Image (tube, rainbow, N blue to C red):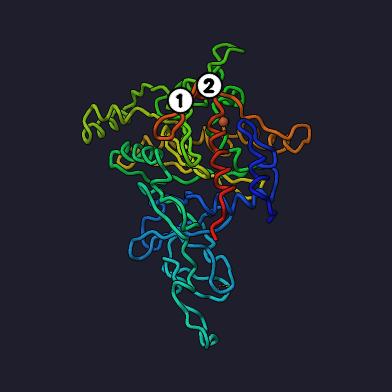
Amino acid sequence: MAGYSNDHIASLVRPDQVHRDVYEDPDLFDLEMDRIFGRSWVYVGHESQVPEPGDFFCTRVGLQPVVMSRHSDGTVYVVYNRCAHRGVKVVNEECGNVGRFMCMYHGWTYDTNGDLDFVTQSEGYPDLEFDKLEHGMGRVARWESHHGFVFANLSPDGPGLREWLGENSDFLDDVAVSAPDGEVEVTGGVHRYLYHGNWKMQVENLIDMYHPAYSHESSSAKGGQQFSRREGDKGGIQFFEKRGKVKSMDGLGTHALPNGHTWQGGLPPVENMSEDHRAYVALLEEKHGPNRTREILIKKRHNVIFYPNMAMQELNPHIRVIRPLAVDRTEIFIYPVKLKGAPEKMFRDQLINLNRTHSPTSLVQTDDVEAFTRAQEGMMTSGNEWVLLARTGPQESLESGRIRTTGTSEEGMRNHYRAWLEYMCADRPE
Ligand code: FES
Ligand code: FE2
């Protein structure tokens, strides 16, 4: 790994510009995996993905393979996906149910919490006293969940999950309360695709309300109705009143929080007269009364980013997981989120809408991926080494540490880079 000094790393980020190396330099990518994904809370998965004892779900924290599993005692664990013998990845399937994990190389087995269970032909190790934990797959330093959303931290140092989430934990509260049963479920499969670009391009795109009118013109111009993101929205989003005159997304609002988190303000309400929506509202009213239900139905936020690797939308609810693979290669996972207790047809419609906007071949998603690929290529030129993030709008700083500004401001991205610098330049604990 390149021995970059903090001074060198700091020189790559100016108040309104970043150096192209942050997207193009493989050594910086390695440092990011160590210092951002190795120090921050990183989203792993939702507890509902492992509902029964023995259920497991494999993912990565940065580049490191981990397993989230539900142990026989009902507790969720996050362990490294690594055999204590000679380092082989133990669990190869992406998800499933087991009584024990077994390494395919020499047959060692592990319990569903990653503890060592059995060493084959153990008489060959006369001098070794095997310890369940020490010779287990290895637990990550910390993991915690909020409304079933599980985050892991490979470092024992730093804030707890709730402190790190800050106001983003209110968002998860809002999502949970919008389910008639008070909880959500991650089910309905996954959209998965890979793009040839740096992972931060996707993170930045999620707070970029400047691009949709142009990148997604084919879906958002008059007559293009593909850009509907919620049940009841029959017209989609239309930016072009007539050619050349764009409706700005400034009214939406950008919010920049500590630790690199960001969100966009909510979209205007859509009148939804469908039978299922009315049934859903009736279920909420039964539980919370009409006033609280009206509040619950107002979606205050659109894309909510949990820096560095997760984002969620409450409209047409889904989770987006950003998995860096290399400096110029990233994998994206879109998981539909089901509001437990809501009419089943609502979830079906949600899946249809997600196919339209977020599948690998959707008419919207493909535009963004094309932009990421072209950016990765364009930044290889030596003509200009700097990327401009200078766009502003009126902004105010709130007491909570949140900055509120206009929708097309690039403040959200500048906020990502403030967090990036903090993680990347923090002195390493011994
Ligand atoms: Fe797993 Fe040998 S490497 S049992
Ligand atoms: Fe987009």
Q: Which residue is mark 1?
A: 396
Position in image of residue 232 (x %, y %): 39, 25
Residue 300, image quadrant: top left
Mark 2 vs mark 1: in front: 1
Task: Check the image and report above or below for 223 versus 127.
Answer: above
Up/down of 53 relative to 194, above or below: below
Query: Which quadrant is the N terminus positioned in?
Result: bottom right
Please provide percent x and percent y for residue 323: 56, 48
Q: Amino acid at mark 2?
A: Gly
Ligand 1 image-quadrant field: bottom right
At 52% from the left and 19% from the top, the residue drawn is: 238
Label 2: which secondary element: loop
Find residue 393 and name its label: 2
Identity of the residue drawn at 35% across and 65% down: 72
Q: Quadrant of the C terminus?
A: bottom right
Q: Does residue 357 appear anywhere in the picture?
A: yes
Labels 2 and 1 touching (C-beta < 8 A): no
Image check: 165 left or right of 92?
left
Query: In which quadrant of the rendered view does residue 279 lie?
Result: top left
Q: Residue furthest right?
A: 382
Query: Badge 2: few (under 14), some or many (20 or more) residues near its Cα, within 10 Å?
Result: some
| Residue at point 69%, 54% (across, down) | 3
Q: Is residue 143 above or below residue 370?
A: below
Question: Label 1 sits on what residue type?
Answer: Glu
Is residue 364 left or right of 118 when viewed as pictured? right
Q: Secondary structure at mark 1?
A: strand
The answer to whether the residue bearing label 1 lies less than 8 angstroms from the nearest atom of ligand 2 is no
Decide which of 242, 404 is in the foreground and name it: 404
Please provide percent x and percent y for residue 280: 29, 32
Q: Is residue 370 above or below residue 430?
A: above
Q: Is residue 342 visible?
A: no
Q: Residue at x 57, y 11 (%)?
A: 242
